Image (cartoon, helix red, strand yellow):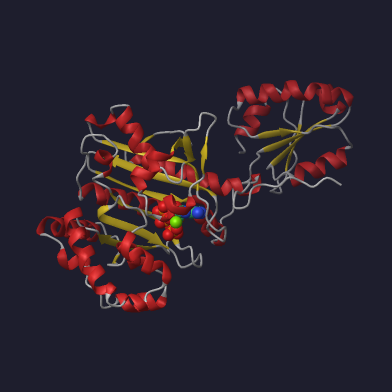
Amino acid sequence: MRKHIQAIRGMNDILPERLALWQQIEHTARAVLASYGYSEIRTPIVEVTELFKRSIGEVTDIVEKEMYSFADRHGDSLSLRPEGTASCVRAAIEHGLLTQPQRLWYQGPMFRYERPQRGRYRQFHQIGVEVFGLTGPDIDIEVILLTARLWQRLGLSGFRLEINTLGDSAERQLYREQLVAYLQSRADQLDADSQRRLSTNPLRILDSKHPETQRLLADAPRLLDVLGSETRAHFERLCAGLDAAGVRYQINPRLVRGLDYYNRTVFEWITDDLGAQGTVCAGGRYDGLVEQLGGRATPAVGFALGLERLVEILEQSGFTAAPALDVYLVAVGERAELAAPALAERLRDALPNLRMQCHCGGGSFKSQFKKADKSGARFALILGDDELDRAVIGVKDLRGDSEQGTPSQAELASYLAARL
Ligand code: ATP
Ligand code: MG
């Protein structure tokens, strides 16, 4: 027997029964984003590798080991996008969008070569926001409130908000030196990854998951202590804005985020319901990135949320999708089978939002009716020779206990409209 070809490890099919959950999140997000005046942008899934190297940073997990990069037929190095920010910035520069503030959002698949596990896949999906041209902290507050509203609209109440500030690049530089000096003298107590990062990307050591390293960090110098008055004021206003809006948060001085381009505000929404992969949404300011990619200096802030993780939480919370069908049309006998498609089309003309499935493949009344019941539809429409001769149609309520009706075919649309 031939071996079945299977999907790539860490890349998932999303089957119809789970899509209702996905769509619930997507529709809700779309509505919330529209209510804040954000516009959707779509960019290619493949970009030149250089774009991600220059934006995300050479010594980040993503660029060092997670990118799907390949040479195309011309030998150019291309990569499947591992995240959305770099592409949005590229597009905004390329199309001259940065002459005025922009509030953009995107959604779609991202690709990272990670070890697949619960909540961590090689193709995963994000919805993200990028705002250009506004210095904050008012806009930082807005994007956080937007995410809070999304959780509320999805009925998700257990998320925790952590915030921090990374300061400006000069402040970070100063802090980096203090941190390295502190850790260098204790390097033998660091885990191997952190030892390596000491020379490449020391700030990342702060979010090491190693208990030993975490203990060491408890007494390390704090970035908050080296902040200048401007970044401090920015952060204080952010906190005050969240307080005023009634959004609870924790300040986590260890929150540094994995990517190089962040500065000042960073935040994460975290849940305890997903095991180790608890971050559902992460973002922050990246005021230097546009210039770093060749555009004119433009402040920016954004976030990305992981759809797979949200889907899993919604599933755990017992979310049940509304049935996908309103009616199922049963047609028994040769004449009825012939008449059914035309009748169905007239009904779709009259009720454009009606969700109707027509039975195909013949069979007895009993077997068709069973399928109608299993379809989850609210009503079965029944068309046989007898109904045809009398120009009526049987309507059976599959979920309630109302009597079977037999409206005329001409009245069918209004009959259904009154009952759905
Ligand atoms: P982590 O520390 O978990 O690797 P990250 O910092 O790499 O996260 P971001 O790049 O900030 O994650 O992505 C934003 C969100 O996208 C994450 O909070 C998460 O919800 C989701 N996400 C990131 N990587 C994956 C993945 N491999 N599979 C599923 N979701 C992911
Ligand atoms: Mg990661």
Residue 375 percent location from the top left of the image? 73, 43
Judging depth in this view, the residue of 123 and 350 nearest the camera is 123
Q: Find residue 61 and report its image quarter.
A: bottom left
For the C terminus, the quadrant is: top right
Residue 115 vertical position relative to residue 8 in the rendered view, above or below: below
Where does residue 261 sit, x and y in percent of width and height? 30, 49
Residue at x 43% of width, y 64% of height: 158
Question: Looking at the image, which residue is at 30% across and 63% down?
Answer: 203
Is residue 344 in view from this perspective?
Answer: yes
Decide if residue 144 is on the left or right side of residue 170. Answer: right
Q: Which sits in the foreground, 304 or 411?
A: 304
- Whether residue 152 is visible here, answered yes or no, is no
Which image quadrant for residue 297?
top left
Q: Residue furthest left?
A: 229
Rendered location of residue 44, percent (x, y): 46, 33
Q: Position of residue 397 (x, y in %)?
A: 71, 43
User: Residue at (41%, 77%) from the top-left corner?
Assistant: 211
Q: Is residue 259 left or right of residue 220?
A: right
Residue at 27%, 67% in the rendered image? 253
Q: Is residue 119 left or right of residue 337?
A: left
Q: Ligand 2 appears in which quadrant?
A: bottom left
Between 151 and 166, which is closer to the camera in this rendering?
A: 166
> Nearest the camera: 333 or 103?
103
**How many badges with numbers are in the image?**
0
